[in-house]
Amino acid sequence: MLVGGTISMGISGCGDGSKKTDTQKGDSTQMDSVAVKNTAVTEKFPPLPINYDQTKVLKNLYVIDRAGVVLRQGADENAPALGKYPFGTKLDVIAEEGEWIAVMDRVQRDYKGANGEANDVTRWEKVYVAKSKLGKQDKITISPKDLNIIVSQTVNGKESYYEKGHPLDKYLLVELIDEQTFLAARNTAKNYMIKDTLSYTKNGKILELPLENGKKLTFTDKDIDNELESMYSYMGHYDFLNAFAVAGNYWESADVRLFDRKDGHLIVECGDYPFFSADKKYLMAFHADPYESTGDLQLFHVKQGKIIPMISVSFKEWMPTWKEELLFWGKDGHIYTAANHINGYWGEEGSLSERSQFIRIKLLED
């Protein structure tokens, strides 16, 4: 094989086991690949293909240097550089050699055949990274610079997307706080949902909610294993809004919708549990998207019984808690949430992490 073309790597996604298959979901991180062109150096540090099934993963380590870490074709600074693993990447360790860690990953090598035709081959190889750049998952944390980087926003119906991230420099002020400040604010929080879930139970696959006009709001489950799947549950109601709250779970999504108790019309659709501010003037829903690895925040203005969209943003580097009790509006008008960096959101065994940092969000004046 002629070495000298582009080399690209398959990066392990968060929450996966030690060994991966080609059928896994798309990776959440990407590595910047480079070309290896110095054939003399390549001869000194040749590629190191390995047998996936016969290679033992000793442990997992993570890239803890925020600048990332270069991976090389040998345990030497002069070995060909294959690319760079970004901060937070989970690596499968197969050996330790002094100041170098050997990891296994898929390498795609493009080359030209004998007749000049372009070909490529992807195989598992042994590659090397500097030991000093790696550490345990608890070192993967949210930094102040991560806080306001977003990948999308919607304001007044206008959507904007930023594939590489973009700083949110208006609408919201996002800051890290300590746990003591967070817990003090939680003592002031109030949840206005009345959780009378036993008042309206399902009859098989059918949920019926009686309306004040004498009619019924009906939801029917579709317990099927395809994109038409839907399951509904009654969550409770809001007296001040005179609204039912109904949770829907679908094929690869979920929502919470509020319906008017008088005539059943849809008041608002939220991406997750709805929280009202202490003065009842605002509504927010904050969702951790496991597919896109984003923190999706929706904000609405409540005016005369109507709920009007204000802004929706998707944070790029961190996701909010999955625990309802750790997400709230404080009496001071700020949003509070426990959160984790996207590469620290899942624990070592694939379960949700119990560790967290604490974030406060302030709505800014237009």
Image (cartoon, rainbow, N blue to C red):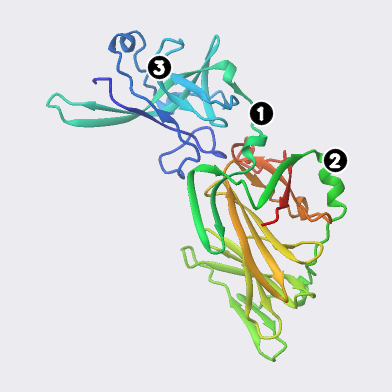
The answer to whether 14 is drawn above or below residue 71 in the figure is below
Find residue 180 and name its label: 2
Q: Where is residue 167 in the image (x, y as percent from the top left)?
A: 58, 43
Q: Left or right of 100: which side holds 138?
A: right
Residues tagged 3 and 1 counted as in contact (Cβ below 8 A): no
Residues tagged 2 and 1 counted as in contact (Cβ below 8 A): no
The answer to whether 93 is drawn above or below residue 285 in the figure is above
Mark 3 or mark 1: name the one nearer the start of the chain.
3
**Where is residue 41, by image quadrant?**
top left
Mark 2 or mark 1: name the one nearer the start of the chain.
1
Mark 3 lies on residue: 73
In front: mark 2 or mark 1? 2
Residue at 66% x, 28% y: name it. Answer: 139
State the count of labels. Answer: 3
Q: Position of residue 142 (x, y in %)?
A: 66, 36
Find residue 139 and name its label: 1
| Category of crowding for the residue at label 2, using alpha-carbon neighbours closer than 10 angstroms: few (below 14), some (14–19), many (at least 20) | few
Q: Where is residue 291 in the image (x, y as percent from the top left)?
A: 53, 49
Q: Left or right of 162: which side holds 248?
A: right
State how far apart marks 3 and 1 are (Cα): 26 Å
Mark 3 or mark 2: name the one nearer the start of the chain.
3
